[in-house]
Image (cartoon, rainbow, N blue to C red):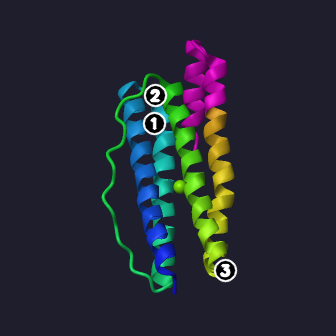
Amino acid sequence: MLSEKLKNLMNTQIKNEFESAYLYLSMAAYFESDSWEGMASWMKVQAQEEVNHAMKFYAHLQERDARVKLAGLTEPKFEWKSPLDAFKAAYAHEQFITGTLNNLMKLAVEESDYAAQGFLQLFVNEQVEEEASALKVVQMLERIGDSGNGMVMLDYKLGERGK
Ligand code: MG
């Protein structure tokens, strides 16, 4: 069974992951409102991945005989200045999530909870990829600058994710 502290922090992580999904879905809606269909699609794939992350924590809590307790979600941001602004915010959000997972791992190590460590290690590893993929889009957008052609090409490329 999980300790009370780990149970509470994992329940908070369910909220964090759903809030990530909510944020990316809000970004998808923002992109869709400006006809960036590829970027919207990329964000919708990302949002679904975050729901999957939340459900893995849900399953781990259940498997460890700990009760899942859902918390209220914070309303996500609605508007961004530009695609670059939105992807920068996505990158910053992934860095925040990495921090929350590191805190969870720190606690699991302190408590010598090896099962939790094994479970969390997968998330810690995946965060490297999550941060890298968001940063890559930020860097491409910075390189593109005001080029309309570049933006259309990038939008097309990002739309291929998950297809
Ligand atoms: Mg996640």
Q: Is residue 1 left or right of residue 27?
A: right
x, y percentage for residue 54? 46, 63
Closest to the observer, 34 or 113 = 113
Closest to the observer, 122 or 113 = 113
- In space, the residues marked 3 and 2 are separated at their CA atoms by 44 Å
Q: Is residue 33 left or right of residue 37?
A: left
Q: Is residue 50 left or right of residue 22?
A: right
Residue 34 visible, this angle: yes
Residue 140 inside the magenta-drawn segment: yes
- SS under mark 2: loop
The answer to whether 23 is drawn above or below residue 106 in the figure is above
Residue in the image at 55% along x and 28% along y: 155
Q: Which residue is mark 1?
A: 40
What predominant SS class does the magenta segment belong to?
helix
Q: Earlier in the sequence, mark 3 or mark 2?
A: 2
- SS under mark 1: helix
Q: Nearer the viewer, mark 3 or mark 2?
A: 3
Q: Which residue is mark 2?
A: 36
Report the disc number at residue 150.
Answer: none
Q: What is the three-letter code of the residue carrying label 3?
A: Tyr
- In space, the residues marked 3 and 1 are separated at their CA atoms by 39 Å
Residue in the image at 51% along x and 81% along y: 3
x, y percentage for residue 20? 45, 50
Q: What is the three-letter code of the residue carrying label 1?
A: Ala
Q: Earlier in the sequence, mark 3 or mark 1?
A: 1
Q: Which residue is mark 3?
A: 114
Q: Which residues are magenta?
A: 138-163
The answer to whether 48 is drawn above or below residue 120 in the figure is above
Residue 38 visible, this angle: no
Closest to the observer, 145 or 33 = 145
